[in-house]
Image (cartoon, rainbow, N blue to C red):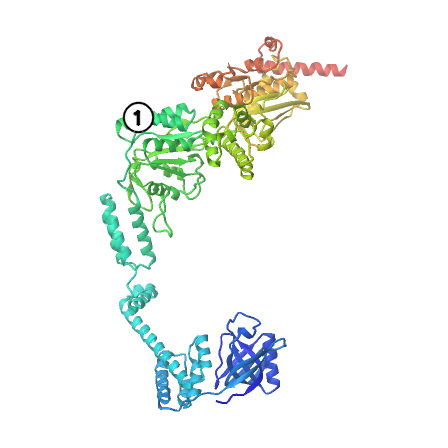
Amino acid sequence: MSEELKTLPLLPLREIVVFPNTAVPLFIGRAKSIFSVEKAYSSDKLIFLSAQKDAKIENPSEEDVYKVGTICKIIQLLRLPDGTLKVLVEGVSRGRMIRYFSNLEYFLVEVEIKTEVIEADVETKALLKLCKESLEEYVQYNKKISTEILNNLLEIEDPAEFSDRMAAILNLKLDQKQKLLETVSAKKRLEFLLNFLRGEIEIIKAEARIRERVKKQMEKTQRDYYLHEQMKAIQKELGEREDGRSDLAELEKRIKKKRMPKEVANIVRREFKKLSLMSPMSAEATVVRNYIDWLLSLPWYEKTTDNIDITKVERLLNEKHYGLEKPKQRIIEHLAVQKLTKKNKGPILCFVGPPGVGKTSLAKSIAEAIGRRFVRISLGGVRDEAEIRGHRRTYVGALPGKIIHGMRKAGTINPVFCLDEVDKIGMDFRGDPAAALLEVLDPEQNHSFHDHYLEVGYDLSQVLFITTANTLYTIPPALLDRMEIIELPGYTEEEKLEIAKHYLLPRQLEAHGLKPEWVPLNDKIILEIIRRYTKEAGVRNLEREIATICRKIAKEIAKDPESFKPFKINLYKLENLLGVPRYRYGVAEEKSQVGIATGLAWTETGGALLQIEAVIMPGKGHLQITGKLGEVMQESVQAAMSYVRSRALQLGLPLDFYRKVDIHVHVPEGAIPKDGPSAGITIATAIISALLKIPVKNTVAMTGEITLRGRVLPIGGLKEKLLAAIRGGIQTVIIPKENEKELKDINPKILKGLEVTLVENMDEVIKIALMLEDPNSLFKEAPILDVWQLVDLEKKFDEEKSVALEH
């Protein structure tokens, strides 16, 4: 085998191998490759072509191309408008790269010419003949090879040329073509190509058998499943087992073991029979399988045994929750009735109160006390009826609603089911979820609750439903009618102190891995946190502040555990731990002022003090109202103003006082919306104080709706308002006489140190609220005139004024 060396330009190829004795068109785009082609074309037109190992490499090095390639002659070169080249090359002989010249404008290599080894034995002739026969058979199945190409190949008698040209037209992978190029023995190349052809022919025949078998199995209506059936046939041809059979057997075992109502069992068996006839890969089979899984995973008869020990329940509720005597008493009564009747039917309990007072945790404690499982779902922001009832199975990705999800999670048919934030359910074009809850929460209907997905009745009659809400006015009346309201009011300072000492602090110490002596919080410091760092009806923010103190102390201990010494937490240290106080304790005014009255307001987070300001300015009788007040509150200002005008003579004011002045009524914290009629007497007091220039006592707060005749009407949220008065340092609270009956339901401890004054009309309010030396001297004796007498009197005053001006 003679070998010689040549120095030739190199052209790296991407995803292609050029064989000797073949002509191939190539498109050249890389700069160095273009230089290589031009260099070769300008000399003897010989160039060395070698495939890249990785086609993604833009500028290949010596290691990035195969050593063995093809020495080719450039037959034709054409320059394209975009600067690229189109060349036609013809393979001359095999070559091996010996040396690679770098740092040039083009690729240049030294190549060793490899001489072909052509065996002239009988076996080589036999291989050549078999390859030609196999190629003829292969072309019958593969129509991509034309008859002309086949005839040209069959005329070739040289084994080396035949093997190279046949390798070029077959659908070989890059590594297979490179292997053939590196093989100099024509006999070995023929063996490789014969094996490849026979393998391809067998695969094509198998595909033909599969298609024929699938075609016979399928009907015209089943053509959509052609690809799947072809896959099944391939698996069968390979001798593999069909997937899914074992899953169906396991599912059948679950169906036999599961105890279900007769109607449900019939549906499950019918759906299982349908599933067994379906293809496991079809979309409908997945839907049916999911449906059967849901029916099997739901509890139908599984239940926990109630352990209603009234004494134990009472003790457990007292251990877990401080205060809340009325709610706990109502819960115990509810459970006592269940114990005696052995039935769960009864009112649905609805815990209503500000955030952080323990509504959800109270529901959880009930489940723990009676030995039932607890499930909670949040309804806040739910706007779609399907969230409650589920979607019909005709929809893609359909699932049951939240109720059925909760029952599967519980695993029993008698859990304690907490529907949290029932007051925050929305409604839009997709339906009204609150209407869907009517069936769930009605003891007369929920024994057969219909979820759209299940399409069978599900018994919810043994579930103990408890709902929670912050307000009642957003709950639809029909839904509210099905629930018994248990109010959980805000905590007093004393209650918060006890909760912090006995519940919140121990829990945070455990959560942070601290000892009690490391966090010495006494009553004075806890009260300071309550007053100056929180402003809430519940205790959620109070727990956060205690957790902040624990974290900061834990950080100090973690820095140097050996040298840490517990320190006393005083007011100065507290400010270092929690920062500057966020709230001013006692939001009542520091001194009595003219035109400023303190009202009592109800909010979702509890009660609050509301300052109402009124100023009098020279003007023409304009009444200005600011503070982002709602329509009802603006009407209260109008009603208060009309009352003051009607009592002008009794108050010692000129009848035409309103013509000479402008009155501006403002409620501070203008970014917060405010509404409601209960500030009526407060507004009237502020206006009267500004007109008479008599200060309003800063220790007095009031609430009540005012009428045009000065009557004081009842209001709501009395307990929360009284708690706000106590927190604000108020000494006297004025409330409507008709609210007297509600004082009996309020713990006497709350009223301790607070003087509650009951009034029926506005005159009483003025005498109590204003700083008068003699309250009885305010309302001067004046005749009670009707409206026409008042008009005549004003006309007389106007005439006298005109005469005075003329003189």
Give the residue at mark 1: 336
Secondary element under disc 1, as helix, strand or loop, is: helix
Image coordinates of residue 658 in percent, x first then y, are 64, 20
| Camera-side residue of 407 and 758 | 407
Where is residue 406, by image quadrant?
A: top left
Other-residue count near label 1 (Cα within 10 Å), few / some / many at <14 / 14–19 / ≥20: some
Residue lying at 34% horizontally and 50% vertically, measured from the top left? 393
Q: Is residue 397 visible?
A: yes
Q: Which residue, as the protein is rendered here, is positioned at the far front?
A: 562
| Camera-side residue of 402 and 432 | 402
Image coordinates of residue 272 in percent, x first then y, are 26, 53
Q: Is residue 82 visible?
A: no
- Quarter of the image with the C terminus is top right
Give the mark count: 1
| Left or right: where 651 falls relative to 72 | right
Residue lying at 27% horizontally and 41% vertically, measured from the top left? 300
Residue type for callout 1: Ala
Image coordinates of residue 712 in percent, x first then y, are 51, 18
| Camera-side residue of 139 and 789 | 139
Residue 360 vs 226, above or below: the answer is above
Image coordinates of residue 718 in percent, x first then y, are 48, 22
